[in-house]
Amino acid sequence: MLVGLFSLSLLPPALVAVIYKDGGGTAFIQAFVLSLFLGFMLWYPNRRHKKDLRTREGFLLVVLFWGVLGSIGAVPFIFSSQPDLSITDSFFESFSALTTTGATVIVGLDSLPKAILFYRHLLQWLGGMGIIVLAVAILPVLGIGGMQLYRAEMPGPVKDSKMTPRIAETAKALWYIYFLLTVACAFSYWVAGMNVFDAICHSFSTIAIGGFSTYDASIGHFDSTAINMVCVVFLLIAALNFSLHFAAFTRRGINLRVYFKDAEFKVLIIVQLVLTAICFATLYHSGIYDSPEEAFDYALFQAVSISTTAGFGTESFHMWPLFLPMLLIFSSFIGGCGGSTAGGIKVMRMILLLKQGSRELKRLVHPRAMFSIRIGNKVLPERVIDAVWGFFSAYALVFVICMLALMAMGMDNITAFSATAACLNNLGPGLGEVASNYASINDGSKWILLLAMLFGRLEVFTLLVLFTPTFWRN
């Protein structure tokens, strides 16, 4: 049913091809027929089989959501003659879009058919929504997601520990928030100077924190401070936990105090301010830009874009003094808040890792003392701290294995490090060979990075659990 439903997403790009007469619609009609047929063939023999989902099926379903739909999403790229992509490149582009990574193998976006450009952004938008529902509604039920575990006031819509109709209600509410933010973002881009097509496409990739653009020069193509500021504002909104948006805009009215009470929100804003200040000071003193205003514009945009794992560009940030690109790549490990469309380890986990480190230092001085870790007024159970450490160690292990595998494929160390970070954190642009695009790396490296995208998007454990013997035992 999911494959059949997903096939409907192939019709809007075909309509765009008709409107712009760019000849790119045939591939989408062929892909629509194929995926609809495939979905029907999978559904028809099993249509009478009804059973309650257990946790194990939940894990499998979540992984298959990205695995199967990413594969189906590659079909239009395979069928399309422009761009003429190999099967590996088609899969890489599709998974990069759906996981909102934003790494691309396509060169020459400016001359592509509008249908293909629209489709890439639509995939990111759908993937972004999938992430929100996954992080806020599904993973808490499976027992491994939920940043709700770490909240002082539980502002999120899900407080149940079992599959109930409430998940459907939650998903619907999140859809409304996500859709309204997209409309507001598109309108703002249009007012700032984009044409309608570019405004819609960039609103899709901004709210999804994906980073795809309709131009090779990304947001820098427009050379507009107003457009840069619109992008920064909506990236920050999308990097917040959607549970906060849900809690702030309830039927009882608007309550913005919810944001300022949230520890994760405050830390995210502090991180952005510090990064922007460092980038601005370095750029201003290096004399790369003519005026302080220009230096600040570039510093603010790139700091927010890279640290929230969007990966939009107004400037080739890899050409800056090397300290800054490395700083920004490392900042993408923090990413956005839990329950947002951003990638990375997430702000809340970083807060807990710092608090745990601080507690261990205190224990060295006072071995017999009992120290608890709090978020707001809430004391967190030890299980949560253990889970965060487990996640961090698994994340680090996946990172090291992927990076070493890329180096074994012949990639230089800077490219291997930044490409792994960019894909595992769902960031997109890296340094070295992958600073602009991923077209020049070999096919083996692309498949490794595709797997890294999935690990990053599925919060590592969700995918890792499928490789354990315990999962498959009855």
Image: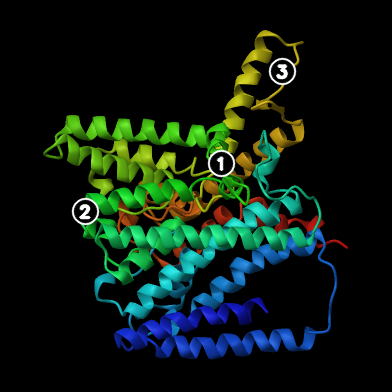
- Is the C terminus in the top left, top right, bottom left or bottom right quadrant? bottom right
How many discs appear?
A: 3
Q: Nearer the viewer, mark 3 or mark 1?
A: 1
Q: Nearer the viewer, mark 2 or mark 3?
A: 2
Question: Which is nearer the N-term, disc 1 or disc 2?
Answer: 2
The residue pinned by badge 3 equals: 371
Cα distance between the residues tagged 2 and 3: 51 Å
Give the residue drawn at x 45%, y 80%: 12
Give the residue drawn at x 36%, y 54%: 429
SS category of the residue bearing label 1: loop
Q: Amino acid at mark 2?
A: Ser
Residues under numbered marks 3 and 1 in contact, where contact means CB atoms less than 8 Å apart:
no
Residues under numbered marks 2 and 3 in contact, where contact means CB atoms less than 8 Å apart:
no
Q: Residue furthest front?
A: 252
Cα distance between the residues tagged 3 and 1: 34 Å
- Residue 21: x and y in percent read 30, 88
The residue pinned by badge 1 equals: 255
The residue pinned by badge 2 equals: 224
Q: Amino acid at mark 1?
A: Asn
Q: Nearer the viewer, residue 471 or 148?
A: 148
SS category of the residue bearing label 3: loop
How many neighbours does mark 1 have within 10 angstroms: few (below 14), some (14-19), or many (20 or more)?
few
- Residue 213: x and y in percent read 33, 63
- Residue 3: x and y in percent read 62, 79
